[in-house]
Amino acid sequence: MKKEVKFEKKHIEWLYVLLVIGALAVGGAAIFVLPQQSYSEAENRYLTKLPRISAWGIFSGEVQRDLTEAASDQFPARDQWMQTATTSQYLLYHREINGVYVGKDRYLFDKVLNSDLSEKNYRTNLGYVTALKTITDADVSVMLIPSPGTVMTEELPTRAVLYDPEPYETLGEQLCEADSVRWIQTKDALERADRNNFDDIYFHTDHHWTTNGAYVGAATYLKTQDTQIAEQERFDVQTVSDSFYGTLYSKVAGLPGVRADELELPQTLPENLVIESDSAPADALSADGEKAMPTLAGIYDLTKLEMKDKYAVYFGGNYGKITIKNPEAEGKGSLLIIKDSYANSMVPYLLDHYEQITMIDLRYYNESVPELAAEGWDEVLVCYEMSNFIKDRNLFKLIR
């Protein structure tokens, strides 16, 4: 009897091994047979395709690397497999999945640790900003927006660990003010808004702040310029989508119980705005992964509301350089914003106060920033999410 049981167990084990090998073999073969996918709308990124084989590619290791990435990106039913894995981890009480914390009320947070950040790089980046001050006669300010998890700490899962922003706040203020650059702290104002308002200041499924958080940021900045922002009700903020799943959700797609965010936009903005840009957005891609100049309704590209990356509704995405001119604000001055995508949703609240606002994104802007900064701006604002600024490797362009 024992011999028969052992025999059956051995056959079951071999059957399991053969099934796994068979599934991998079929999936691997399908990669070479099925049409290659160029873009993943769910993940909002290009996918790696099978490489062309060449002797140079083999000896350099490029072919092997691309084959490994393509095997992952082109595997059949990839999205379904990812959803199954994410759901399984969550049901096993994992609250950190693919570098994302699953918080209370189904808030999602980027897992950014102290070890992920470099004080040396932070000092260097601030040095580039203060060096820019010597080039322009403008009023230069730095406003680093706190990461969502450092403001909404009560929403983090139990025992979650994030980087400590306080030393960076203190150091930033010291270094900036030593060189006559204004340091603008927004954390206190955002924490007050989070405690006192019923409206979300950060999205549940995305790493950006909502239009409510952006309003707080705009009000904080304008206050440093001795300017009073209008009440938010004056902007007639309306929901334009109730099915926004952001970048963090893309990392944990299929997570049970996560509801979509509402995307709201200010509707009452200056009329006859003039938008100028030499090229299409660098990172806002259509469903087939193509880049094209958007058709804007004022400052909004409403076609993006039908796509995965709905945050690109602001201007159609991130440009190397984009200028907004407001004829109704003639004589009110000019503002140059050096920014990441956090600034996109803040600009609508600034339009009434400037005749011209130009935004540059150093990830995509490759012309001379010193020459641009010397063109006679009234104000220059460096606006980034804090951990993005600390890690950024493009700020050297400020002095190039």
Image (cartoon, helix red, strand yellow):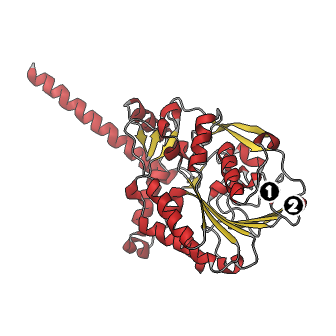
Assign a secondary structure to mark 1. helix
Looking at the image, residue 286 sits to the left or right of residue 160; the answer is right
Instruction: Give the image location of residue 12, x and y in percent.
Output: 24, 30
Q: Nearer the viewer, residue 101 or 380?
A: 380
Q: Nearer the viewer, residue 333 or 275?
A: 333
The answer to whether one can see residue 31 in this image is yes
Q: Mark 1: which amino acid? A: Leu
Alpha carbon separation for disc pair 1 and 2: 8 Å
What residue would you read off at disc 2?
Answer: 329
- Single out the residue that lies furthest toward the left: 2
Q: Name above or below for residue 49 compared with residue 336.
A: above
Q: Which mark is residue 281?
A: none
Mark sitting earlier along the chain (1/2) = 2
Q: Name above or below for residue 27 compared with residue 319.
A: above
Disc 2 crowd, CA 10 A, few/some/many (<14, 14-19, 20+): some
Please give the name of the residue rendered at 54% of the width and 42% of the height, measured from the top-left corner: 249
Q: Mark 2: which amino acid? A: Ala
